[in-house]
Image (spheres, helix red, strand yellow):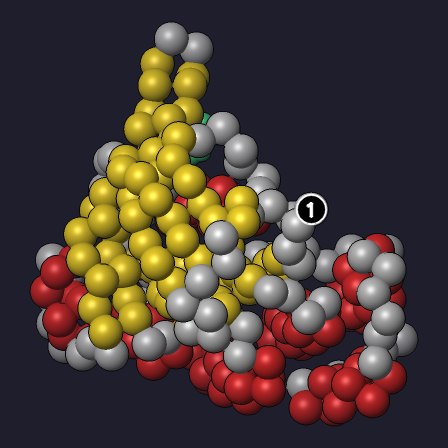
Amino acid sequence: MLSIRHLSVTYHHGNAEVKALEDLSLSIPEGEIFAVTGPSGCGKSTLLHVLAGVLTDYNGEVRMDGRPLSPQQFSIGIVPQQYGLLPWKRVRENIVLPAMLRKDEIDAAELESTIEILGLSDLLHRYPRELSGGQRQRVALARVFLQRPQLLLLDEAFAALDMLTAEKSRQLFLHLWDKHRVTTVMVTHNVEEAVAMSSRVAIISGSPGRLVDVFEHPDADVIRRTLNQPER
Ligand SMILES: Nc1ncnc2c1ncn2[C@@H]1O[C@H](COP(=O)(O)OP(=O)(O)OP(=O)(O)O)[C@@H](O)[C@H]1O
């Protein structure tokens, strides 16, 4: 269980203060895909930065299975919007790097099957610059699943792809996710994506970011209405 209690984050900018998140509480059971959406600037990235352990200056409590969440205590996998591949490493090295850095043993059969599912077998010797956006994103997915994370964070992970490529990547993601069923928090602007991929969708309001509501298996129109977006 991932438990966020009364999380508040304030950025200090000279004398000015920006309240990015205020009194946010959420409980996310193990093995759930949980989506977070809301207007630009409502604190979605801030929330992910806290969960990733990048931002530690906050008030409140963030625990996983009763223990404070930190990258030292838990394996936390992240798929950032621009995928975070190392340009000077080939695809294969990019895929195995995080597991190697953690000194985790890599299961050769799992490596092979992940590479095959993601259609990367013929690309292992290429550099990231020699890949399409969709291929780069699939390398990031291979890398994060082979890390065997206890918590998976997706930061607009499909946003940079065209519609068809994004849809294919989402299907591949769900296929791999189903094998691991890792607790996942995904931040997305895309209401359809949130609704299709997650079991619950949280809406955060803008400035300061406060939790508006959490919907279970919602209809996209319910989310749009809450966000004040036109319904389709
Ligand atoms: N390092 C920082 N210093 C000062 N203010 C910041 C900093 N990072 C973010 N903010 C502010 O905190 C608020 C929340 O930002 P955040 O990036 O978390 O929002 P977001 O929901 O992810 O936005 P977007 O959807 O546009 O990416 C915004 O008002 C932003 O300007």
Determine the secondary structure under disc 1: loop
User: In the image, is residue 12 above or below residue 143?
Assistant: above
- Left or right of residue 171: residue 28: left
Image quadrant where residue 172 sits: bottom right
On-image quarter of the C terminus: bottom left
Between 132 and 95, the residue placed more toward the observer is 95
**Is the CB atom of the residue marked by disc 1 within 8 angstroms of ligand 1's nearest atom?**
no
On-image quarter of the N terminus: bottom left
Image quadrant where residue 38 sits: bottom left
Which residue is identified by label 1?
Answer: 72
Residue 83, image x, y percentages: 63, 60
Residue at position x 66%, y 58% from top? 75
Between 51 and 143, the residue placed more toward the observer is 51
Residue 65, image x, y percentages: 51, 58
Between 78 and 8, the residue placed more toward the observer is 8
Residue at position x 43%, y 10% from top? 14
Residue 2, image x, y percentages: 44, 58
For ligand 1, give the image quadrant. Answer: top left
Q: Is residue 136 visible?
A: no
Seen as rendered, the residue at the extreme top is 15
